[in-house]
Amino acid sequence: MTIKVAINGYGNLGRAVERAVNAADDMEAVAVFTRRDPQSLKTAGTPVFPLSQMADFKGKVDVCICCGGSATDLRTQGPAAVAYFNTVDSFDTHADIPAYFADMDAAAKKAGHTALISTGWDPGLFSIARTLTEAVLPDGYTHTFWGRGVSQGHSDAIRRIEGVEGAVQYTVPNPEAMRAVESGEHPQLTTADKHTRLCYVVAASGADKERITREIKEMPKYFADYETTVNFISAEELARDHAGMPHGGEVIRVGHTREGIKHLARFQLQLDSNPDFTGSMVAASARALVRLHEHGHRGAASVLDIPPAWYSPSSPQQLRAQLL
Ligand code: NDP
């Protein structure tokens, strides 16, 4: 069976999802939905439709992958799409995941659909690494470090501020905090202790830079708790020095199975392109979602509710022979 995929929103992630779907033998991209003029988008071949035509595709799409930003798009985009389709998204505002799950669960159950939320690498693969290592080493502690890399969610949040024409945000890990975690001494570290946030912003001509800086630094959940540096640069500098979107990070679990017997489990990612990798994970999640739906699940689910084999195009027999 070929999985028919619709892509809702065509930014960095939407483009990466299209590439990943086109590269998969068992998937086909049948539509891109956009809020912009469809004529203005150049896809890799997938036909583009205005968002208002989404309802016409009910029954013709196995999964709709919602690629809007977490800051302002997905809280409304997700429930609207799941009324017509099974959905996958990469909602990554960690603090709001329980509320988003509840919204998606209610909307999906009402429509008889299935919604796999918050896939990607964090949340996503890192969530799986945290859960597994905590289960295996219950007497211990976990720390997650991100970066150095561009956070699309944080860059997206800055770009929504009035007077901002472009922005990139680097999350930078604190090496001293990482050494403290590895030592096994159970350091008490907040996310803000472990990272700093470095922002490069292009302001519109005449925009109030002090207000923009204040709005960034005071933005709850995204920047307010961190040591945040804001640098204003030109559009040329942004294009020349900050065009790539590398990212990565690691989940570290340190635990003991007996007095004096210490273990360190580490799951690390080094990504040349955050959207490419996230798009690949989201496409694999679309395959898993279809199986979750076939198994009768209705409502929302997270990556933690999915058997790992369901992400793979290989059969259980192949997986047992090659990867077990
Ligand atoms: P973008 O800002 O590139 O795109 C977000 C939306 O904005 C698009 O869906 C698109 O909607 C619209 N858009 C894109 N480009 C333009 C443009 N030039 N002009 C006007 N509108 C535009 O965000 P990303 O694709 O980089 O990231 C999407 C989200 O992915 C992030 O907010 C984050 O939440 C999530 N993410 C999750 C990760 C994880 O590990 N879980 C990792 C990385 C990202 P439309 O076509 O309808 O206009």
Image (cartoon, rainbow, N blue to C red):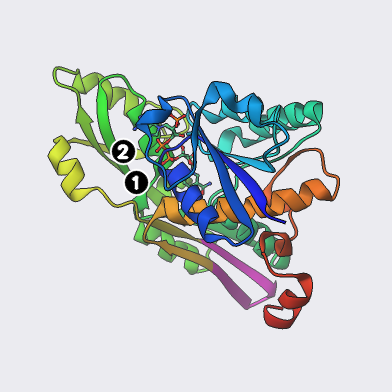
Q: Judge from the rendering whether residue 9 lies leftward or rightward of residue 132; answer left or right.
A: left
233 over 193 or under it: above or below: above
| Occupied quadrant, residue 233 | top left
Magenta-drawn segment = 251-266
For label 2, count other residues whose C-alpha is less than 10 Å away and answer few (under 14), some (14-19) or many (20+): many
Q: Considering only order in the chain, which callout, 1 or 2, is on the residue closer to the N terminus?
A: 1
The C terminus lies in which quarter of the figure?
Answer: bottom right
Q: Quadrant of ligand 1?
A: top left
Ligand 1 lies under 8 Å from the Cβ of mark 1:
no
Residue 29: x and y, percent?
56, 47
Q: Judge from the rendering whether residue 221 lies leftward or rightward of residue 161; answer left or right.
A: right
Q: Judge from the rendering whether residue 237 lies leftward or rightward of residue 109; answer left or right.
A: left
Residue 204: x and y, percent?
19, 23
Please give the residue where the numbered disc 1 appears in the rendered image. 196
Q: Residue drawn 75% across and 59% down?
A: 307
Q: Amino acid at mark 1?
A: Thr
- Which of the pair 203/148 is nearer the observer? 203
Please give the residue where the numbered disc 2 appears in the rendered image. 228
| Occupied quadrant, residue 61 | top right
Q: Are marks 2 and 1 in contact (CB under 8 Å)?
A: yes
Q: Is residue 124 visible?
A: no
C-alpha span from label 2 to label 1? 6 Å
